[in-house]
Image (spheres, rainbow, N blue to C red):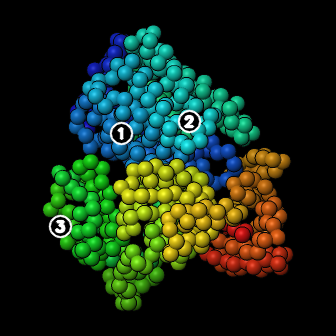
Amino acid sequence: MTQDSNPESFQKKHPPNKPLLQFDGGDWHVLMGAGFSWLKQHSQIVNALNVFPVPDGDTGTNMVLTMQAAWKEASARTSTAANEITQAFAQGAIRGARGNSGVILSQILRGIAEQLHESQEIDAKGLAKALKQARETAYKGVIKPVEGTILTVIREAADACEHAAALDPDLRFVLASTLTKAKQALDNTPNLLPILKKAGVVDAGGQGLYYLLEGMLKVVNGIPLPMPEQVTSETQTAMPPPDLHDIGEEEWGYDIQYLVYGDHLDETQIRQALLDMGGESVVVGQSGSIVKVHVHSADPGPFLSYGASLGHLDDIVLEDMTLQTLRRKGEWDDSKLQLVSPSIPALPRITEHECLGVVAVASGPGLARVFESLKVCAVVRGGQTMNPSIEDLLQAAESLAQDEVIVLPNNKNVILAAQQAAQLAHKQVHVVATRSMPEGIAAMLAYHPGAGIEQNLAAMKAAAASVHTIEVTTAVRDAEFDHVSVQKGDLIGLVDGQLVSKGDDHLQVALAALALADADEESELISIYYGADVSTEAAEKLMEQLQEALPDFEIELHAGGQPHYDYIISVE
């Protein structure tokens, strides 16, 4: 970041009592930082704007994490040219985007950068053109755009910006007019999307965008806001999702991660070199002159030395996964710094011939093991409240040996990120738009290694569509949908994402949901995946009760380990 890219310099450069006629890149960095900071401080409010009363409000978190990636990329630049800074924000956001709201936000920043690709400064008319391009890019990024969402807010904000720029070149006036219209559009979202009116909320993504714009206007009007790195733990309300390492996965050796800054870097050559060196779980991704390396090995030395030979290293992460695993298993005594049990298995190596060219998102370690048992090559952590980023999915797909890869997002809020990753990939990536873990598992069961890609895609889509998914969780707020009235703390059941039942215990809720799951005479299998907060004994008791109540079904029980949802149940 340049010395001029801070709020104090901005206020000296642009006193509030004088017209503001143009921004340079440093100014844009300050504005975006203020918007990010303001969004960050209000992310819990955005998270709470959830249509259904289920514990998956993560729109604010996803937008914060998307902006965090954008901010990090832009902060590495020293230029004051608007085109370079807007491009940096776009690049960071695109690769770090999470969830539908984060992906759309990344497309908004991408549109701004595309319009300003030759601009050193931004004036009122240039900003209007940039927001117009942002609107068009955001709409194109969604296969079926829906009004009453963040798309409506950016559309009407862009129109207002254009009208204001035609009246007055002062950017303070233009931004104020833009924000006013954005607020009107946000308040109107329930009238455009009936489900929002039923829930009594405005669109969460639109609210997040409003906070971003509001933060920008505050700085322009002389109201100081902290830059993102100055937001304290008391004000920061969004945290990155936990890594699967933290919830029980057994891994060995060292986890080695770093960024390489250098000229003429080739991610394909780097990936092959890491594999030739004996690296495991190799993931390499490139953006311009920066390459991200993630590799596992029993000896980190050669891999760090190799990275240093390519260029400058940054963001180095080195974790001893062996110690982490041994501590979890009670096989390492920290007080004596010695092994309780010395048996450490060798690192497994998955090759193209041992796994299938599929990437699957899994929300718990048990579900991850299910996909691995079906020979999925790469399992990406994620699910409700912890959506993986575009870069997570992209790197997983690029790391596989296969030339064609299939991605199973297994969550409706990950589908758009998967589709964007497919567009960015250097290989052919196909997305089967699975909306739940059971749909993804059904899709994998339909995969035939000897079939062609088109045949497998058709079979997997058909299999996913044939499954009904039931989720049993706890209501996080009072709500009423389709004549089901629930209060905060009630056990509730959803069928394919729709609230259908409530009750006093899991059996009551599950039975009511199963009765409404449209299980026909051909349905014969019920699979139960119990969550991280459910004991094995409780899950086994529920299975026995369901088997007694539904004797015509075969019932299977699996430890899913997913957070928030006590039970995920599939009917097929």
Residue linked to disc 2: 150
Can you give x and y, in whole percent of width and height, for residue 120 in the image? 26, 26
Vertical placement of residue 556 versus 475, above or below: below
Three-letter code, disc 3: Ser
Looking at the image, residue 490 sits to the left or right of residue 284; the answer is right
Depth order, front residue of 388/15: 388
Identify the residue at image location x=36%, y=34%.
113
| Residue at the top extreme of this rendering | 167
Crowd class of label 1 (few under 14; some 14 to 19; many from 20; radius 10 Å): many
The residue carrying pointer 2 sits among few (fewer than 14), some (14 to 19) or many (20 or more) residues within 10 Å by Cα, namely many
User: Disc 3 on helix, strand or loop?
Assistant: helix
Name the residue: 50% across, 38% down.
Answer: 140
Quadrant in which residue 542 is drawn? bottom right
Residue carrying label 1? 89
Residue 226 falls in which quadrant of the image?
top left
Residue under pointer 3? 305
Q: Which mark is residue 470?
A: none
Q: Can residue 283 be seen in this view?
A: yes
Return the disc, 2 or 1, that comes first in the chain's sequence. 1
SS under mark 1: helix
Image: 322 above or below 263: below
Amino acid bearing label 1: Phe
Q: Earlier in the sequence, mark 3 or mark 1?
A: 1
Q: Is residue 10 above or below residue 413?
A: above
Q: What residue type is labelled 2?
A: Ile
The N terminus lies in quadrant: top left
- Alpha-carbon span between mark 3 and mark 1: 30 Å
Name which of mark 2 and mark 3 comes first in the sequence.
Answer: 2
Query: Label 2 to label 1, Cα distance in Å?
Result: 19 Å
**Which residue is found at the position 81% from the left and 50% from the top?**
484
